[in-house]
Structure formats: C-alpha cells, structure tokens
C-alpha cells in the first residue's frame, strides 16, 4: 500500500463503521430489541474469530508445534470468556419486553448459527444426535461439513503425544510438567469455558422464556439446551483423572 493510500484510511473507513452500524435493524418498536440484535451479532463476530484461531490451532497441532498450540488455546479461552460474559447484557432483558418483539424473529433460532455449529464440529462433536440436529435444518452447511471431515482436537493432541513417545497417563504422572501437560490443561479449560457458556445460555433462556417454553424456530428451548451442557470434546482428558482415585483411566 502506498503512503498516500494509507493516509486516506481512518478509523471509520478501516473498520467499515458506517456499514457495520447500519446492520442493526429492529423490527419492532420495543427499545430492547436493539440490545438483543447487538449481542447476537457481536457473538457471531467473536465466533468468526474463534474459528480463525481454531484453524491456527489445528495447524500448530498438525505441524507438531505444542508451544504455538498452547498460545492459540489460551487465546481461544480468552475469546470464550468474552462470548460468555456478554450474555450478562441479555440477562437484563425482562420477559415481558422480549415477548413484545419475539414474534418478529420468525423462524430464526440460535441453533441455526452455522459458525457455532462449525465450532462444535471442529472441537470434536461427532455424536449421532449432533449430526441429527444438523440435518434437521436441511443440508449440512459446507462450513460445518468440512469441519466434520477434519480430525478432532482430541485426535490431533493424542497423535502429538504418541509422536513424542508418551501417553496421556504418563503426561500426568511425570515428575516435571512439560508444555504438553500445560497444553492438555489449556484444552480442558477450553471445554470448561464452552460448558460455562452453554450453562449460562440455559440459565438465560430460562430467565427470559421460562423452563418449559419452546424456543424460537420450533426448538425445545431450555429443555434442549440443558441436554447439551454435558457434551464433551475431550473425554480422554476427563477420563485420565479417574486413574488417580482407583478407577481405571481410559487410554486412546
């Protein structure tokens, strides 16, 4: 880029603020609808960033660079904390206010978020129920389909361990923690952060809709969301802990 071209760029043009700030289009007269839109749009922007970091994490794991992988997971964890924290804004939405503009959402539902589903797939969800939910919305989107064709994060991490000549159990019984141990713990923290987001989302839906009200787009609302809290990306990382308390740890 030439110096003249760089000088012509300012804060607003670099961030495309005019276009960005025109994307919030409330359909009702309720003033709280703007907040609802902003939180969901910003979540999608953070999802985009998380997917970008997950791609870089996969590259680091595939190229056997645990130090760079650890850096990426720590950044992903920071992004997950942001996504979870912004739900606090929607916790200020009274149910009677949401009821006034909920009908304007049509068939839209958070379960239709392609980026969120891609994050789940990249991270490791492969359960039949997950695939069934994807197919309920028609053909699986290319972004999600391509994610399902890639190795899971757990598979890549365990392959890295094998190449380093160690097992998951040995990683936790070694006398001196290694970068692989800290990477394992960071991956588990990622799962925890994701689980906390799920739990907080369930609590939010119950707070605004009630525990028995169906979700938008024909979903089961909080009843369905509560079932997803226990989904695991890294069952081996959870299982290895049992070996310290008398139960056999499962090895890959």
Image (tube, rainbow, N blue to C red):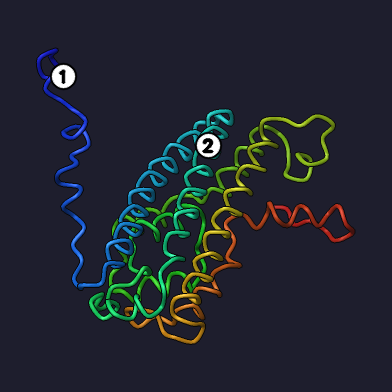
Q: Position of residue 201 (x, y in %)?
A: 49, 66
Q: Is residue 22 left or right of residue 113?
A: left
Task: Give SS at disc 2.
Answer: helix
| x 35%, y 73%: residue | 135
| x 35%, y 47%: residue | 48
Please tell me whether residue 246 is drawn above or below residue 138 in the rendered image.
above
Please tell me whether residue 196 is drawn above or below residue 230 in the rendered image.
above
Residue corresponding to mark 2: 61
| x 44%, y 54%: residue | 86
Numbered circle sitting on residue 107: none
Name of the residue lying farthest toward the bottom = 212
| x 46%, y 58%: residue | 120
Residue corresponding to mark 1: 6
Which quadrant of the figure has residue 134?
bottom left
Between circles 1 and 2, the one closer to the viewer is: 1
Q: Position of residue 97 (x, y in %)?
A: 34, 76
Circles 1 and 2, Cβ within 8 Å, touching? The answer is: no
Q: Is residue 154 left or right of residue 18?
A: right
Q: CA distance from mark 1 to mark 2?
A: 36 Å
Name of the residue lying farthest toward the right = 246
Please tell me whether residue 125 is drawn above or below residue 73 in the rendered image.
below
């Amino acid at each position: 880029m030439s110096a003249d071209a760089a000088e012509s760029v300012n804060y607003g043009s670099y961030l495309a603020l005019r276009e960005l700030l025109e994307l919030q289009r409330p359909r009702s007269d309720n003033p709280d609808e703007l907040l609802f839109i902003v939180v969901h749009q910003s979540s999608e922007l953070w999802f985009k960033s998380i997917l970008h970091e997950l791609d870089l994490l996969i590259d680091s794991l595939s190229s056997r660079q645990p130090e760079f992988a650890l850096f990426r997971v720590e950044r992903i964890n920071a992004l997950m904390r942001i996504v979870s924290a912004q739900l606090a804004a929607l916790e200020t939405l009274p149910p009677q206010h949401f009821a006034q503009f909920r009908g304007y959402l049509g068939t839209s539902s958070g379960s239709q978020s392609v980026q969120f589903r891609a994050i789940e797939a990249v991270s490791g969800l492969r359960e039949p129920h997950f695939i069934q939910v994807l197919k309920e919305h028609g053909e699986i989107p290319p972004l999600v389909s391509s994610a399902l064709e890639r190795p899971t994060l757990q598979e890549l991490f365990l392959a890295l361990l094998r190449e380093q000549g160690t097992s998951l159990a040995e990683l936790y019984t070694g006398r001196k923690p290694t970068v692989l141990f800290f990477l394992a713990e960071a991956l588990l923290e990622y799962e925890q952060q994701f689980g906390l987001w799920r739990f907080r989302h369930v609590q939010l839906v119950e707070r605004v809709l009630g525990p028995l009200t169906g979700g938008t787009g024909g979903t089961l609302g909080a009843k369905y969301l509560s079932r997803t809290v226990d989904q695991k990306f890294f069952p081996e990382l959870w299982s290895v802990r049992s070996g310290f308390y008398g139960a056999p740890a499962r090895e890959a």
